[in-house]
Amino acid sequence: MDITQILGMLSGGKKNPALEQLMAVSTMLNKLPKEEQQRVITNFVEDLKSSVAKLEDK
């Protein structure tokens, strides 16, 4: 079972724009080579940490 299937189960068959976006991103990531997937995820996590730090400083 991959992340796209898990997100689909979480939606319970209902329309959920946020979950649909996550599923689209997951589908795109699954098409990338593993090394590229890791790079994209690492960059996203670093950006997220930076954004959280900025919010905490306010």
Image (cartoon, rainbow, N blue to C red):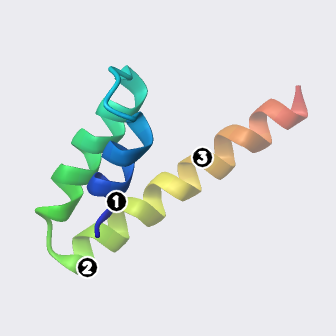
Give the class, few, some or many, for how many residues have Cα within 10 Å of label 1's Cα (few <14, many ≥20). Answer: few
- Between disc 2 and disc 1, whose residue precedes? 1
- Secondary element under disc 3, as helix, strand or loop, is helix
Q: CA distance from mark 2 to mark 3?
A: 20 Å
Residue 12 place in picture, x, y as percent: 39, 35
Q: CA distance from mark 2 to mark 1?
A: 18 Å
Q: Amino acid at mark 1?
A: Ile
Q: Nearer the viewer, residue 30 or 52?
A: 30
Q: Residue furthest left?
A: 31
Q: Which mark is residue 35?
A: 2
- Between disc 3 and disc 1, whose residue precedes? 1
- Asked if residue 32 lies left or right of residue 16, the reply is left
- Asked if residue 23 lies left or right of residue 32, the reply is right
29 lies above or below 23: below
Q: Amino acid at mark 3?
A: Leu
- Asked if residue 58 lies left or right of residue 29, the reply is right
Q: Nearer the viewer, residue 8 or 36?
A: 8
- Secondary element under disc 2, as helix, strand or loop, is helix
Q: Which mark is residue 46?
A: none
The quadrant in which the N terminus is found is bottom left
Q: Which residue is mark 3?
A: 48
- Between disc 2 and disc 3, whose residue precedes? 2
Residue 2 place in picture, x, y as percent: 29, 66
Q: Quadrant of residue 14?
A: top left
Q: CA distance from mark 3 to mark 1?
A: 20 Å
Residue shown at the point (66%, 38%) measured from the top left: 51
27 lies above or below 58: below
Q: Which residue is mark 1?
A: 3
Q: Amino acid at mark 2?
A: Glu
The quadrant in which the C terminus is found is top right
